[in-house]
Amino acid sequence: MYISIDTGGDFAALEFGALEDIVGTTTTKTFNESSCGPPALTTSTADDPVFVYEITDGYWKPGTTPGSIVAYGSNSSTGSYSATHHWSETVTWRFTNQPDVRLIIDATNLDSWRPMATLWNGSGSEPTIAGATLQINATLDPKPSASTLPLPKAQKITFRLTSSNVLGTAMNSPRLAPENSPQDLQFEASLNTPLVFVDKNTLHTPTGLIEDAAATLSSFDWGAYGEVTAEALLEDGTTIVARFRNTGEPMRIPKRQATSYIADSWKSAHGVSNLDDSSDNETLLGGDGHSGDGLTLYEEYRGMVANGQRVEPNPTKVDYHVYNGYSASDPVQSQKRQHIITGIMQFAALADLQPHYDYGLADFTPSDSFNDNDPSKRIINFNALTEGLRHRTDQHLVMIMPSLSLTKSKAHFGPSVPRNISRVELASSLGDSQIPWTTAHELAHTANVPHHGDHGQRIAIWERSGSTVTEKINASDSGITIQVHSESTGISVPGSILPPSQIMIISHEVTNSQHGSIFGGDETCLMRQPIATAVHWDRWPLRRYVIEPHETPGTDLCTDRLGKTFNKDQNMYPQPVSEPHPSRHGDAAPQRGNCREKICVNDYYNHPPYYGGGVAPEEIP
């Protein structure tokens, strides 16, 4: 191969020999195609192999070593496919016949580094202290000082950054003015002396003869991503662009795949290297068949802030987010707060969820009252990156608050997914031992799980006069005289041993096949109400069967709608009663029960409330 050099009158030929003898070659080809639509621009750079073009014009100059010549130039051509479809192509090149250097770019501990951020509430000046830093290194290879060949040094090395600028610094932080958060990645002047600071995206060394340079990159976002490159102006006046680890790949920050914004090291540590950033496919041991928790892999990687502490959801578990509105500083509420946490953990364990319950009011926009289920509030991933489906839905947390009611606890606008639950309120009269179970029960309503039925309950007043017992609907009711029996034995109970007056929760037999009792179904299930104190079967209109001992609250989630012990048909009472012994409360209603298979906390699916916009049957305190 020969390159002809016109030296201004004399004609000279520079013999390179075979193609493989050409060193330090660079060719860049740019192809621009335009039509009625947007122009399509394609650029490719190659160092090996050499691409051969017929060159009609170019330039040359002496290299930095004796006998070396650098040939460089460009060649452009244009054409048209039609009157509206045109193309242009430009090829640039640089060849030298002497050993040359390359510029290699890398970063210290890049393989394990990930971006971080410092806490900022969105007020005042943006943060000036980085959450993490990364040292970027650019080095001539081989180093001229270590080579036996006469190689050029660099007059100047320049670092250039392209950075993301995602809203906020984490998925829910800051809540106020997230648009004022700093650029995710940047060069800071204070950390990069004696480099010349051009702007947060550009640094360069002072002019001189150098072989390497280092720059410090700062991170201000837990989900930051970008690319850093470098270029060296050599002694011979030519410029070379850095290669990442001597490959053709750009240096991505953090180290990641071309289609991902998540650090490879984080994916590997969590066993999710095969997942896309948009993935939301965690599964439950049960569940209704809807996978995920409303947070994409990128959102879980970027994480949340709760009361000043970072929260990183588990990418292999279904995450569930709760605000505990009971004050940790109030002596009375702080004790209840701990019992509520116990209930949260119990429910999460039953439902196979990963709970996060340390959120504060500064971490989200709270609902104003139990009537306020505005879906623009209670969101925990509002600083969203929608590119590439990295945000699939607004995911909501569940608020647990004290109720103004003395006796009623309720998941308002449930059962449904968290999006529709304005808040969970716990009755103020609950004792310490009742709070964990009630919390777990109500939280199940926020995960789309209903009661076993909506019927079969009423409250009555029993009054005794001598051995006569009267049942009243309220204090002003004249009432009816009833006979009291033991539900376990069927034997008549003398009225004289009963209290003079007591409030009873009556389980009334449900005969409509499309309905079910709130007390029915699997006796061990969390969603079966265990508070009935007497049973009324229709076949004995004036009899009431007292339940002793009291029923035990369920501590599991059922897998069918059937009663297993006292809620299945007992056939006959033994002697001396010898009467039928019906099921105490019956099975769960059709389409109810099987609670483990109803769980869903992913707001992407937005299950409508079972009770039609929050109008639920009255729950017995």
Image: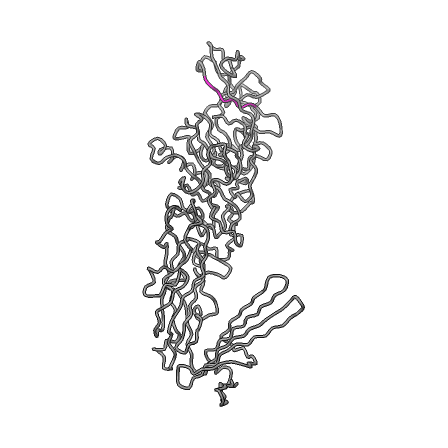
- Is 175 situated left or right of 570 in this image? left
Residue at the extreme top:
466
Residue at the extreme bottom:
10
- Is 614 situated left or right of 229 in this image? right
Residue 440: x, y in percent? 45, 35
Residue 215: x, y in percent? 36, 64
Residue 14 in view (yes/no): no
Q: What are the residue bounds of the magenta stretch?
A: 502-508
Pick the residue in front: 233 or 286.
233
Pick the residue in front: 469 or 387.
387
Check residue 79 for magenta coloring.
Answer: no
Residue at the extreme right:
82
Q: Residue at left 39%, top 85%?
A: 66
Pick the residue in front: 7 or 512.
7
How many numbered badges does the structure rendering display? 0
Residue 390: x, y in percent? 51, 52
Is 277 located above or below residue 541 in the figure? below
Residue 322 in view (yes/no): yes
Occupied quadrant, residue 327:
top left
Is 380 located above or below residue 564 in the figure? below
Check residue 504 for magenta coloring.
Answer: yes
Residue 433: x, y in percent? 40, 30
Occupied quadrant, residue 223:
bottom left
Q: Main secondary structure of the magenta part?
A: strand
